[in-house]
Amino acid sequence: MKPLDLRPGEVHWIGKNIFARGTRGKGIRYGISFCHQGTRYRKIVGATVTEARKALAVTRSRIVRGRFDLADTEPSPLFEVLAQRYLVQSKATKVSWKHDKYFLNTLSAFFGGKRLGEITAWHVEQYKSRRREKVGPRSVNMELALLKRMFNLGIAWGLVDKNPVTSVKMFREDERAMRVLSLDEQTKLLMVCRQHLKDLILFALHTGMRRSEILGLKWTFVDMNQGIVTVMSTKTGHTRHVPANAVAMEVLKRRQLAERDYVFTWQGKRYSRFDKTWRAAVMVSGIAPIRFHDLRHTFATRLVTAGVDLVTVGELLGHRSIQMTLRYSHPGPEHRRRAVDHLAEVAPIRHLPKLRGGRKPR
């Protein structure tokens, strides 16, 4: 973008320490930006680049001679300014903006009151170590990723010159363990569930839908004639169409008797949470601990085990890349056992050459 094309409030950087800013009544104004004793300062100095360059040279000279006047500068904005701007941008562009809002509250509790130009990699490292005492590495990494994104946008918006998160390393994350529900475990779990929870479990196992997608499913998005469920994803913001098999259709027909707006209801109201009911059912069934989200993983793994290609599995899950699908489709121990047993069948030991002279291999 050329400086002459700037709208009021927009900033265009000319080199490292000089910028142009659009104003309402005075057109384009030029300013200088520099760091002194760990603090970032900005100041509008004139209507031309030449004036800005002269002002920058004079300021540098004053710093060298120890005559730098703090009152003659414009400090960088507070962290809260960047946080508020980012939240507005997040609401307008992201479906999961509420997650950003939650992370921003945590970040603001630490960085609030600090000038953006004052925040260094050392401050970020401090935040990183303190947060690790309370939450796991994955949570800290998500917060740092958001902070890094904020500063990148802050640079684009002319609020700050550099990103202090760039040089900070993320925590190493162990791969999250994912459970696959075996058929035997499925039987034990369903035997202890009441019908409403049983319907939720069966529908998740046979559609692969996320919990939020299932609980938010309305009858207007269910085509009983074609057996198609239209999923308005609350996570990705995209729409996909999931065919309902015989088991899923049986659940839908049973739920259809309720005559409500939402497919899954309890006592006439839409389901909100059923965590306690779920944990109680898992405990009573005697199976190993498992999350409701693992039913989605079970759906994907069973399809892969049955020979369904990863592209189709990814489309059913609503993934945007094949890498996401691979994470959900690790073969189970029984599948791996059949694989190595098959190797023994195609390459049996009798085909190995016999050793002469009774010598044993070293």
Image (cartoon, rainbow, N blue to C red):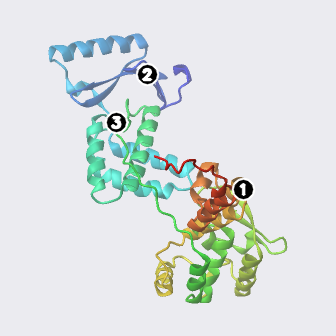
Amino acid type at mark 1:
Asp
Say which of marks 3 and 1 sits in front: 1
Are the residues at dot 3 and dot 1 in contact (C-beta closer than 8 Å)?
Answer: no
The crowd level at tag 1 (other Cα within 10 Å; few <14, some 14-19, many 20+) is few
Residue 318 visible here: no
Marks 2 and 1, how far apart in space? 59 Å
The crowd level at tag 2 (other Cα within 10 Å; few <14, some 14-19, many 20+) is some
The first of marks 2 and 3 along the sequence is 2
Q: Which mark is residue 309?
A: 1
Marks 2 and 3, how far apart in space? 28 Å
Say which of marks 2 and 1 sits in front: 1
Q: Residue 239, how many percent across, how many down?
A: 70, 58
The quarter of the picture where the N terminus appears is top right
Q: Residue 343, how many percent across, how many down?
A: 65, 57
The first of marks 3 and 1 along the sequence is 3
Question: Observer-nearest residue: 74 or 18?
Answer: 18
Per the image, label 2 sits on a secondary structure element best described as: strand
Say which of marks 2 and 3 sits in front: 3
Are the residues at dot 2 and dot 3 in contact (C-beta closer than 8 Å)?
Answer: no
Q: Which residue is mark 2?
A: 29
The first of marks 2 and 1 along the sequence is 2
Per the image, label 1 sits on a secondary structure element best described as: loop
As drawn, 15 above or below 200? above
Which residue is at a point 51% across and 64% down the rendered structure image?
Answer: 178
Q: Which residue is mark 3?
A: 164
